[in-house]
Amino acid sequence: MGGSIANAKAGRDGNGSANVKPSLTAVEFVEAARKIRVLNACRHASVGFALTSSQYDSIGATGVVARLVAMKRPALSTSIGSYLSLPRSVQSFARSSKAAAFVSASDRNESSDAQTAEAAIKILNEDTASSLRTDSSMVAAKGGYATVALAANRAGRPGVANLLLVLETSIADKVPALVSIGSYADAVAVATGARDADLMFYALMEFEKACASSSTGDSATKGQSNFLNTVVSKFTPESFRLLEAYYSSHPDVKHVMNLLLRAQKYSDAGSTMALRALEKNRSSERNPMLKEASRIFGLGKETIFQKTCTDDYLELLSDQELLRTKYGSSDVAPESSSVTSTIFSMIKYAGVNREHARRILSDAEKIAKKYRVPEKRLWHVKVRAFGESDQWTQLRQLADSKVKPPIGFKPFALAVIKGMQTVSEIMRYVDRVPSPEERYDLFCEARLWKRALDEATTKLKDGRRVLHVRSLCNSSEIQQLCDELLSRM
């Protein structure tokens, strides 16, 4: 073809053949010949796509393929793509268009769904023969099967569409395709398997739109009911939880409640309603919602305990309101979610309202009995409330009311220590603590170092506790005493 040959010297391969490189003139000739052949094919009367050489250079071979596809000439675009060895994505696009055109033109009376799908697969994988890969399902580019499946569905061949979508490997293309053909449950299942929450949510919302659009006017409720029934019975558990989380973000609680009740998840439904009720500041809004939560809990056999707790809380709120009205103060029983805190506030208020202290304490006992507060918890509440409200006389009477309090005397001692009472008042309770270890700890808490040392040496005989006292106190006298005691041990 004129021009020189590179490596004109005896460069040879393993078979003895010369390694030759075509000249630049030869390369330009081949490219021009290919361009002319493509231009002639495009300007053929059956195609009608006339191009000049400069126009071809402007849009490029890829642009020619795209315009042929738009002109519904997928067969020619596929041939040109293969002839020019265009990028695989371009060739796959052309083959997908060709396969889609074939499926759309196929007649169900002449070929079965399986035959049509097989022919479409062959078109998508036309380069299989030149490929070393033997798995034809992996040859087509991602999204190719989904594109042809959509065309098959539009042509009224849903069976072909389903067969092709089975081979689609791109989840991002497969899920929207399944949604487009109305296979919402399959779309959700595929998205769930891929653990793609975005596609899962997309399929859910598209199905909800489809149900809403299929029913208008008075039947709108029926469409929503159909949507919820399908989600509960046919969709994956993961998609159900995703929809529940989405509905829970709505200000209106009715959406998530309808979903949970349709699934007969009475525990979740009642808990959701109760939590929403607790967010309300006004009792006029909160109490009706709590009553509804109690009703929902009553629907299930396994939620009797939750119903009882909700009913008790409603009754507690009513009792708190009665107490505030009775004593004319909000401090006697502030609104709270705890029986313990209610009793605590009542006992503390008795220290403020001395005139009605006896009656208030009696009402606190009634509340504790009504709501079955354990004895030890009630004693702890009383000790802490008496201590924080400086009702030291009441605390002494409580300590002396029984031979041995069920919680012991350590909580009493801690209460007077925290209240910075006199040493004699502290010793009133510490002396009644039987454990030497606990007495030692109480003496350290009260900073009664000599008594703590006495307990550590005479009762416990523990030098480490002496060292502990020495490290805590800042008195040189006590530190010297510690050193003397350690030398004797």
Image (spheres, helix red, strand yellow):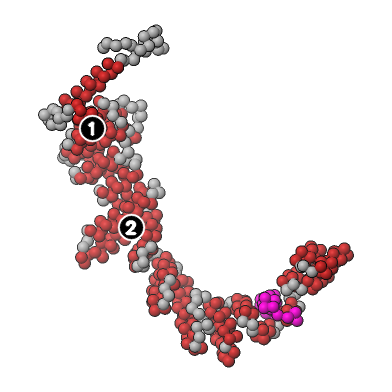
Give the residue displayed 26% in from the left and 41% down from the top: 147
Compared with residue 75, is residue 181 higher up or lower down, i.e. above or below?
below
The image position of residue 66, as x and y in percent, is: 23, 35
Which mark is in front, 2 or 1?
1
Tell which of 251 and 54 is nearer to you: 54
Residue matched to label 1: 59
The image position of residue 295, as x and y in percent, is: 39, 74
Farthest left residue in view: 45
Farthest top residue in view: 10
| Secondary structure under the numbered disc 2 in the rendered image | helix
Tell which of 460 and 58 is nearer to you: 58
Give the residue displayed 48% in from the left and 78% down from the top: 335
Q: Amino acid at mark 1?
A: Ile
Q: Judge whether residue 416 is colored magenta.
A: yes
Tell which of 472 and 162 is nearer to you: 472
Q: Does any portion of residue 297 appear in the rendered image?
A: no
Compared with residue 270, is residue 318 higher up or lower down, i.e. above or below?
below
Residue 465 in which image quadrant: bottom right
Farthest bottom residue in view: 355
Give the residue displayed 68% in from the left and 84% down from the top: 396
Residue matched to label 2: 231
Residue 5 in which image quadrant: top left
Q: Amino acid at mark 2?
A: Val
| Secondary structure under the numbered disc 1 in the rendered image | helix
The image position of residue 145, as x and y in percent, is: 28, 39
Q: Which residues are magenta?
A: 404-424
Q: Quadrant of the N terminus?
A: top left
Tell which of 9 and 229 is nearer to you: 9
3D distance between C-alphas at marks 2 and 1: 49 Å
Residue 443: mark in rendering: none
Asked if the residues shown at circle 2 and circle 1 are in contact, with their CB atoms under 8 angstroms apart, the answer is: no
Compared with residue 377, is residue 479 higher up or lower down, i.e. above or below?
above
